[in-house]
Image (spheres, rainbow, N blue to C red):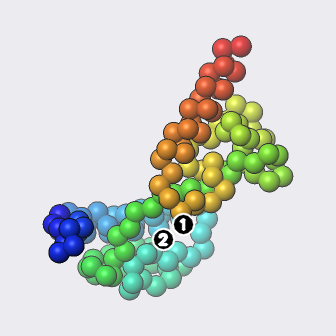
Amino acid sequence: MRLRRDGSPQLDYVLGDVEWQAARRALLQMAEIQFAAGARAVLPVHENAGLARSWPQAQQMIAALPMQLLRTRVVSAHVMGGAAMAGDERQGVIDHLGQHWQVTGLSVIDGAMFPTSIGANPQLSIYALALRAAEALAAQLAR
C-alpha cells in the first residue's frame, strides 16, 4: 500500500506463482462444478477462454490459458440472491425469518435471502437478518 499525491491510499497486490496456480485451480473447480450440475457449456472468466462443451474440453483449455494480469480475472463479489425472501411462496423461496416455504425445517440464513445484489457489502444486513432468524428458530425449537 502507498499513498497517492492526493493522500488517498493505493493498493497494489502482487500476484506470484502461488496465486496464479490457485486461479487456475479455481477456474477448473468452477467448470467441474458447473458440468456436474448439468451445464451443457461453460465459459471460464478469462479473456482467452472459449466455450467448453465438456469437462475434458474445459480441463484442456484451462490448462493452456495464460495466467496473467488483465487476462485472468481476479475479482471479489458479495454473492446474493438465489433463495429470495418474500411474503408468499409464489414470489420467493423463504419467508421473513428464513424458513423455506415448501421444505419444513429448512432455514436459509445468508446472502441468498436477498432477491438480488444490493450493490453494497451486505455484511451488516446479513448479520441483522441472521440474528432475527436465529432468535425465531431458537424460540420455535424451544417450544
Q: Is 131 above or below relative to 21?
A: above
Judge by depth and name the residue closer to the eye, 93 or 7: 7
User: Label 1 near label 2: C-beta < 8 Å?
Assistant: yes
Q: Residue 24: horizontal and vertical position, in percent? A: 32, 69
Q: Is 86 above or below relative to 103?
A: below
Q: Is residue 72 left or right of residue 19?
A: right
Using the rendered image of the protein, determine whether residue 40 is visible from the camera's viewpoint.
Answer: yes
The mark found on residue 35 in the picture is 1
Q: Is residue 68 left or right of residue 29?
A: left
Q: Is residue 79 left or right of residue 7?
A: right
Secondary structure, mark 1, is: helix
Q: Could you tell me which residue is drawn at 54 percent across and 44 percent down?
A: 126
Residue corresponding to mark 2: 55
- Counting residues from the start of the chain, the first of labels 2 and 1 encountered is 1
Mark 2, Cα crowd under 10 Å, few <14 / some 14-19 / many 20+, is: many
Using the rendered image of the protein, determine whether residue 17 is visible from the camera's viewpoint.
Answer: no
Secondary structure, mark 2, is: helix
